[in-house]
Amino acid sequence: MSWNVWSRSPSTASGARRRGWRWAAAAYFGLISVITYPQIRQFARGIPPEADAAFNIWRLAWVAHQLPRQPWHLFAANIFYPEQNTLAYSDALLGPGILTAPLFWAGVNPVLIYNLALFAGFIVSGVAAYLLVEDLTGNRTAAFISGALFTASPYRFGHYDHLELQLTMFLPLALLALHRAIRTRRASYALLAGVSVALQTYCSIYYGVYLATLCCLVGPLALLAERAEERWPTLGLLAGSGLVGALLVLPYMVPYVGARRTVGPRLDSDVAYYSATPADYLSPAPTSVLYAERLRAAKEDLHLFPGFAVLLLAALALWPPLSRTAIVYSIAALFAFEASLGIHGFVFPWLRRWVLPYQGLRAPGRFDILVILALVVLAGLGVARVTGRMSDALRVLFVTGVMAIVAAEARMNVVLISPPTTPSVVDRWLRKQPLSPIVELPLPSPDQPFDAIEGRHIYDSLFHWQPLLNGISGFFPPSYLELLERMRTFPDAQSAAYLKSRDVRYVVARKRLFEPGAYVRLRDALSGQSVLRLVASFPETTGESLVYEVRR
């Protein structure tokens, strides 16, 4: 057994390294454009139709809206009125929200901003994986292919509408800093590792928590190869890095602790539903062009198939003799796989019992991103092993073939909608009114509150920011579920009186959001309602909008 990483190539001089990642970024942009086509043609107007896509835009826009006004009330978002800390009912996307805020302030189209953030998540994540594997192998071919595998993992496209789950750039960067801290014993790299974990948390709380856990495994394993007299000082350096990361994250967690008083911890049934089984690793995204009809179907959030390309290339690294890096990342992959099993395994239940942040997480299956990252590193080691002695022509042919396979495995059927990107007439009217609680119709069923229609409502609120009783998030407070239940019979006298008791001022109905015929039936029923008074009717290009005032 060899404990040496494959030798570094002279091509990894600093100038070549800079050119390498830039060319890689351009290639990854092309790769994602091909996989998600025709998204690139509708970049300024098209988003997935699922509720999460609209929810993503609303979260980014809320951060931009609130930061220059009341940053101390950043988490007091305009949904689920009158609940507090409602932005903390789900991942706040605070990191990307801060970065994209200047674009919102400049008046850039919100759909374009969202797609820029989405594509940046893919591409920068790939570049980060490139840098990690280049550092571990010294082989730019291996780094390029690993970056492509991480950029276009099939797992990502089961979460195409989950922006926070595409922002994975700090996963490989934290590991890169960790390895360099161990190798050089420099405090700057240890500090960078802690900061990277914190930044990953600000992009995705799930991945930040999972990354911190993985670092607690990879760090000690990598230290075993160091001389005994160097281990304890380096371990102290890494502990300091962890403390820095925790201190940076602590302010972000305060509103989540406050929100937990309202929503409580995750239910055991939720964790059970999102716990993976080994069979789920044969489940591709339902939008997969190549595999959707060929491999096993699974529940939402559990399309964990990593793709055959990464598995085959990773197998090359596991052929003896094994390197130290291959052993470390094989253990990391097995650990993340076991943790993804949730209640079906041992790691996640233990973490949920003893580590506080895990009590707010419901999706153990999302550990799959760390399985993929470990496989990507192993694949890089495998590519470095087989391409080291290839001629330039053969290496180009090899890379081209791998990239074609990666694109084919990840290619997805893309369905897009085009939400409005400028205020409608009714939104401009609402924006001029004093801040008052409103209800947007129609409402979803109490049995299925996470509905695309609520995504449309909160998206429309970008253009007026009135407080809504409506909402969508990872948690639903009791007050919202009561609203849905009491509004089943709307517009009868009891439901109208209920709105009055909730201090609702306006009820808004937009024809474009109703099923055929439902809008006319509601309008006719409301004409005889004494508690609600029609105050405005607005012609729109997509159909009229009505605003009713709740009489006091």
Image: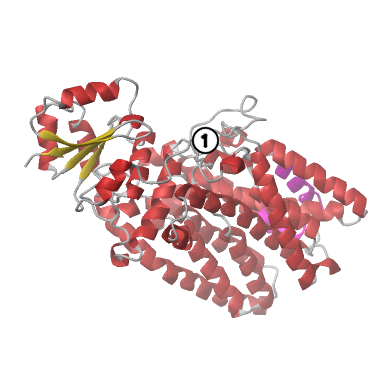
Residue 273 point in image, percent of width and height? 43, 36
Residue 19 horizontal side relative to residue 425, left or right: right
- Displayed quadrant of residue 253: bottom left
Magenta region includes residue 348 = no
Q: Is residue 377 visible?
A: yes
Quarter of the image with the C terminus in it = top left
Residue 239 horizontal side relative to residue 390, left or right: left
Circle 1: residue type = Leu
Judge by depth and name the residue closer to the eye, 238 or 287: 287
Judge by depth and name the residue closer to the eye, 194 or 505: 505
Q: Residue drawn 60% across and 51% down?
A: 122
Q: Is residue 390 visible?
A: no
Q: What residue is pinned by disc 1?
A: 416
Q: Residue drawn 28% across and 25% down?
A: 519
Residue 381 point in image, percent of width and height? 76, 55
Task: Establish if 398 lies above or below 377.
Answer: above
